[in-house]
Amino acid sequence: MSAARYLREVGQGYKIKGVVDCEQVPELARINGDLGRLGGLLKLWLTDDVRTALFGQSTILAVLSKIEVTQEEMGKIMTKIVMPRSEP
């Protein structure tokens, strides 16, 4: 919406509906933190860090799978955030 249209509609008393669902933002932040932690584990493994010496291929594949699932979850939450809610 352009600034002119916004000002015109507010001036005429129209209720402006936001496109962001603020209730979902904390959930999105939690998921983003999960992705950061999983990415940190993967980075440690890729740098041959001593702390990851016991990580086997199955562990790394599990981390990659979890990252993929978490990204999908994040996508679903993002869709909820930008989709307007139906009014009751």
Image: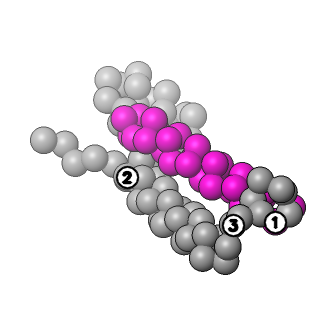
Per the rendering, the mark at residue 55 is 3
The dominant secondary structure in magenta is helix
Whether 59 is drawn above or below 81: the answer is: below
Q: Which residue is mark 1?
A: 46
SS label for mark 1? helix
Residue 75 in view of the camera? no
Q: Nearer the viewer, mark 1 or mark 2?
A: 1
Which residue is nearer to you in this view: 83 or 17? 83
Sequence-wise, the earlier of marks 1 and 3 is 1
Amino acid, disc 2: Lys
Say whether residue 15 is magenta: no
Look at the image and give the residue range highlighted in magenta.
Answer: 19-47
Left or right of 45 in this view: 26? left
Task: Identify the residue shown where x is 77% and y is 63%.
Answer: 53
Q: Which residue is mark 2?
A: 80
Say whether residue 39 is magenta: yes
